[in-house]
Amino acid sequence: MTPKEKERQFEAFYRDYQHKLYRLCCSFCGDEEADVADLYQEILLQIWKALPGFRGQAQLSTWAYRIAINTGTAFRRNRTRRHLPRVIKDADLPAQEQHPKDERLQQLRAGIARLLPSDRLLITLQLEGLSYAEIAAISGHNTNQIGVRLHRAKRRLHKMLLPYEN
């Protein structure tokens, strides 16, 4: 892959997936904005570095999500890497979602944030519109395991949100 081809492929990927990757970072870091920005930058760097090795055996998005999850897991495990030097300016980060005025949506987000990190990740991937098969390919589990784990995570989330129902 030539440097120009690598750059074009990365730019196309970034254009299509920047918001999804950012939300994935939020699922790892919660409301810690500095950590979200650091993790986002680290994920993009890891994808850039690995891009020449992409062989096309999976979809580019599945391959990149796998890198993002591995990077996020390592980042969460090693919190001492806080506040990396900025290569990506805050203006280059995806537009931050406005805090919704809808109280039910706020409660849902708060509930998701209280889930176990592995459950939060699965819920986030499903909310991004990925199928069970895609989530299985990304996570390394089989489709049935994803279905069971998502069902259990949704049940825990529902129990958390019951007190807020009218």
Image (spheres, rainbow, N blue to C red):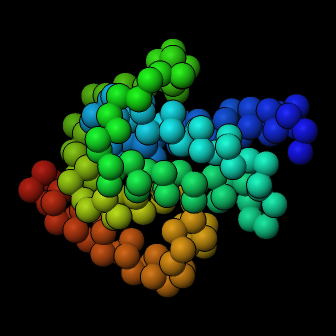
| The image quarter in which residue 26 lies | top left
Residue 101, position in %: x, y? 27, 28
Vertical side of 22 occupied by 125: above or below: below
At 53% from the left and 51% from the top, the residue drawn is 68
At 30% from the left and 69% from the top, the residue drawn is 153
| Residue at the far bottom in the pictured view | 144
Vertical side of 145 occupied by 42: above or below: above
Residue 3, position in %: x, y? 85, 34
How many callouts does the rendering have?
0
Drawn side of residue 99 relative to residue 145, left or right: left
Residue 8, position in %: x, y? 82, 33
| The image quarter in which residue 10 lies | top right
At 32% from the left and 49% from the top, the residue drawn is 78
Drawn side of residue 5 relative to residue 131, left or right: right
In this view, the residue in front, 124 or 47, is: 47
Residue 93, position in %: x, y? 51, 24
Q: Dividing the image into 4 quarters, which one contains the N terminus? A: top right
Drawn side of residue 122 relative to residue 45, left or right: left
